[in-house]
Image (cartoon, grey):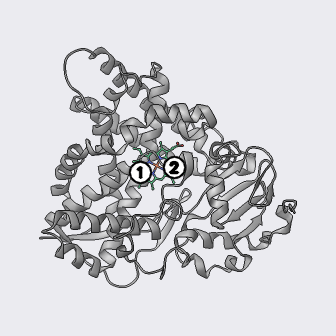
Amino acid sequence: MSHAPASLHHLPRLRTRDLAQLGGLIRPGTHDSPLMALGKRFTVAPPGFPTMLITHDMDDVREVFTNHEDFSVGQLLKRVSNHDRLFGRETLVFLEGEAHRRERRLYSPPFQHKAVRSYQDVMVAAVQRELPGWPVGEPIEFVRVGYDLALGVLLEVVFGDVPVARRDRLRQAVIHWFEAIESRGFLVATMLTPLLGGYTPPYPPLRRGQALVDRLLVEEIAARRAALGDGVDRQDMLSRYVGTELDPHDDVALARNLRGILLGAYETTAITVGWIATMLAGHPKVLAELDSLAEDDARFDAYLDAVVAETMRVRPVSPFTGRRAARDTEINGLRIPKGTIVVLPILLIHESPEHYPDPMSFRPERFLDERPNGHTWLPFGGGSHRCLGAPFALLEARILFRAILEQRRIQPTTGELEPPRRLHTGLSPARNALVTLLPR
Ligand code: HEM
């Protein structure tokens, strides 16, 4: 006997006057949130937003990630966030169906494991260049370290060996553009977006910043085209496109996508670096374990990778992701009308004792024998829009902290871990991850 699908109206609903409780889903310690009383599926309809289904039923999570035809990330971003102003609607994250598959195939090769391993030397060189400049014996903001490193590595990996003046010009342009993104003016424009039905008002400093970055990127692409056939073997990302079978031949589109990649990579990497430093400093036993493995490269790297995975479990930069129903559809016996926003609370899933025994303990060991499970470990999202740069980000984190721990000690901190603060939709250490390095 088949059952008619249930309606969203049959689910528990969070009352509008309790909306503030939603904040409990993005702060560590989600299990203490009163929202838990509403069960694994509940709805909420904040003023100005379409109805939202919040679900941490794992069958739903899987279905929403894998059913790309009915659930769209681009439509969600357009409706509730500033991402279309930031990325442009033609970039990867906004595309769907065949158009997304085609573009993703085009941009994937330089991000696959084998290609990413070839950037290792560039990453090591960038870290070795920066590390001697970091103060010893006084707290430093590791999120700032992460920003400098992420941008340095990205520029080098993406553009390779360009003259210093040109690289500096690009670096400054990216930093200015980011200042516009982080400015109060753009924050206000962003806050208006859901209330204006998904329209983010234009913000001229952002437009100017983007236009300059795009212009410089197009110049770099042109320089690379001009150098084609000069016999030099270039391994940077741009050279892997220009003149190859992957070449989109549309320099403006290539520039826009490269800018999207810079944006997707920059802040997420910096914040993750900050959290890793915070977690290491806050867990002296973990530091001692790494010290004890210093002579055994393979076991050291395996434990360090587990530290990174565990950090991203307890402090995912994006504590939630979501999709918007592109048409009337159904998930696991629940009718989902077109336009419904489905929120997948990543942090809550990461803190569930069903998936992670003793979930509030920071225990890298849980990832030593088992690699993170793609269904329940979701700091990079899931499905066809899962982060393209995940292997890149993980390798970079390993290289950075391996170099730090080889050359410095991290001073353990006592007491409470640095709390998170909201940064856009993400969670960042409130004091930018203040951690002290000591001589080794
Ligand atoms: C620790 C660092 C990073 C984190 C936590 C992170 C996280 C994410 C998340 C949560 C998504 C959305 C996935 C979804 O909703 O299913 C995403 C998408 C994306 N990320 Fe990352 N990211 C990181 C680093 C990077 C890097 C280094 C790059 C590139 C070099 C990158 C490029 C992208 C791109 C292009 C997408 C869009 C993919 C698509 O729509 O097909 N990210 N990332």
The residue labelled by disc 2 is 386
Density class for disc 2 (Cα within 10 Å; few <14, some 14-19, many ≥20) is some
Left or right position of 48 against 433: right
Q: Is mark 1 within 8 Å of ligand 1?
A: yes
Q: Amino acid at mark 2?
A: Arg
Q: Which quarter of the figure is the C terminus placed in?
A: bottom left
- Judge from the rendering whether residue 131 lies leftward or rightward of residue 8; answer left or right: left
Mark 1 and mark 2: Cα distance apart in space: 8 Å
Is the residue marked by circle 1 packed among few (<14), some (14-19), or many (20+) residues within 10 Å? some
Q: Position of residue 68 (x, y in %)?
A: 64, 45
- Residue 390, label in figure: 1
- Residue 177, given in percent of the width and then of the height, sits at 45, 40
Secondary structure beneath dot 2 equals: loop
Secondary structure under tag 1 reads: helix
Q: Using the image, tell me which numbered label, if any, was put on residue 244.
A: none
Left/right of residue 207 with respect to residue 123 in the rendered view: right
Residue 400 coordinates in the image, percent (x, y): 25, 57
Q: Is residue 179 visible?
A: no
Q: Answer whether residue 264 is visible to the viewer in this image.
A: yes
- In the image, 240 versus 261, the foreground residue is 240
Task: Work out whether 138 lies above or below 243.
Answer: below
**Relative vertical location of residue 395 with respect to residue 160 in this rendering, above or below:** below
Percent across and percent down for residue 15 are 80, 72
Image height of 221 relative to 413, above or below:
above
The verdict on label 2 being within 8 Å of ligand 1 is yes
Could you tell me which residue is drawn at 87 percent across and 63 percent down?
A: 1
Query: At x 61% / y 70%, what residue is drawn?
Result: 25
Residues at marks 1 and 2 touching, judged by CB atoms closer than 8 Å: yes
* Residue at the limit of the structure toward the bottom, as seen here: 415
